[in-house]
């Protein structure tokens, strides 16, 4: 394990397990969920994604092929190489604030989805707050829960936050698990047990969204558990294969792209 810190112990990463963040300690508490205990040790070399909790770097897609991207199953030594691209991460910490700067080198025109797949240690009743009126893309797992029929073969439908699913609340265990992408949404806050975590993503000229995964005991089918993912994202879809012209991030002519993720927390 490696602790990234400036003014205190704030971020711990496991370089051998895909550079996964195992701890984010802000405002006197831990924010990352430790996972369902499906695996111990590194996932290096595995072919099928296993949920270990914490925060995985998903690149160049989230869903699709490869599932959760191609970084979670290989070591990360400050930077990582995948699909001809080099991704570098630098962490800077302040008082209850962490800034993570990313630098991507790839061929001009390279299209990708990236997400900070953060699974949060939140209790029932936690509240997720993007800008009111944010447009959301809902995915087929939500179809049985919606008050309208799912359009045939549609990869997603759109609704306005918090949608008919009341996605603003991490609710009781009800056997549901739904994913959504909050479009053009660079900042989200989460209030839980007297503290608020704010996540902000900046990448001028690129599509910036926030993905949400609200699992209230509905996934996986054979042994469901609870998890809440609030995931700053470059792109507007989960699966790169379904991305329209404006739905993926694109490396410019320089062959380089940078972005910054900021996490901060405070008592409320």
Image (spheres, grey):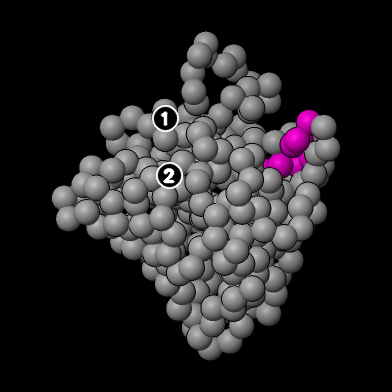
**Residue 195 placement (x, y as % from top left):** 66, 70
Left-right relation of 16 to 240: right
**Residue 176 placement (x, y as % from top left):** 74, 34
Q: Is residue 202 visible?
A: no
Magenta: main secondary structure: strand
Q: CA distance from mark 1 to mark 2?
A: 10 Å
Residue shown at the point (42%, 72%) measured from the top left = 90
Residue shown at the point (50%, 14%) measured from the top left = 153
Q: Of all residues shown, which one is farthest toward the left?
A: 253
Q: Which labelled disc corresponds to residue 241?
A: 1
Q: Front-most of 268 and 219? A: 219
- Taking the magenta stretch, the answer to whether it contains residue 218 is yes
Residue shown at the point (68%, 25%) measured from the top left = 145
Residue 208, compared with residue 224, is above or below; it is below
Magenta span of residues: 214-221
Q: Secondary structure at mark 1?
A: helix
Q: Is residue 40 visible?
A: yes
Q: Pointers 1 and 2 in contact (CB under 8 A)?
A: no
Residue 214, compared with residue 152, is above or below; it is below
Q: Front-most of 136 and 115? A: 115
**Residue 109 placement (x, y as % from top left):** 23, 42
Residue at image mark 2 = 60
Q: Of all residues shown, which one is farthest toward the bottom?
A: 7
Left-right relation of 222 to 3: right
Q: Front-most of 29 and 234? A: 234
Q: Earlier in the sequence, mark 1 or mark 2?
A: 2
Q: Rate crowding at label 1 as few (under 14), some (14 to 19) or many (20 or more) other CA atoms within 10 Å.
A: some
- Taking the magenta stretch, the answer to whether it contains residue 85 is no
Residue shown at the point (47%, 34%) measured from the top left = 239
Q: Which labelled disc corresponds to residue 199?
A: none
Q: Rate crowding at label 2 as few (under 14), some (14 to 19) or many (20 or more) other CA atoms within 10 Å.
A: many
């Amino acid at each position: 394990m490696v602790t990234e810190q400036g003014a205190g112990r704030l971020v711990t990463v496991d370089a051998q397990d895909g550079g996964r963040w195992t701890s984010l300690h802000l405002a006197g508490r831990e924010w990352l969920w430790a996972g369902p205990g499906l695996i111990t040790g590194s996932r290096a070399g595995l072919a099928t994604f296993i949920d270990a909790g914490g925060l995985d770097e998903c690149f160049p897609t989230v869903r699709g092929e490869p599932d959760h991207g191609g970084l979670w199953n290989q070591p990360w030594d400050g930077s990582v190489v995948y699909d001809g691209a080099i991704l570098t991460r630098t962490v800077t910490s302040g008082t209850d604030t962490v800034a993570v700067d990313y630098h991507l080198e790839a061929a001009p025109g390279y299209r990708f989805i990236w997400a900070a797949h953060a699974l949060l240690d939140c209790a029932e009743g936690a509240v997720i707050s993007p800008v009111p009126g944010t447009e959301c893309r809902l995915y087929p797992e939500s179809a049985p829960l919606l008050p309208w029929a799912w359009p045939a073969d549609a990869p997603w439908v759109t609704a306005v936050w918090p949608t008919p699913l009341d996605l603003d609340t991490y609710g009781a265990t009800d056997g549901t698990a739904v994913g959504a992408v909050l479009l053009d949404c660079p900042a989200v806050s989460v209030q839980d047990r007297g503290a608020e975590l704010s996540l902000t993503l900046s990448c001028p000229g690129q599509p910036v969204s926030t993905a949400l995964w609200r699992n209230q005991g509905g996934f996986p089918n054979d042994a469901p558990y609870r998890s809440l993912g609030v995931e700053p994202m470059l792109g507007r879809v989960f699966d790169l294969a379904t991305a329209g012209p404006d739905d993926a991030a694109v490396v410019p002519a320089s062959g380089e792209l940078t972005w910054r993720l900021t996490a901060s927390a405070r008592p409320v």
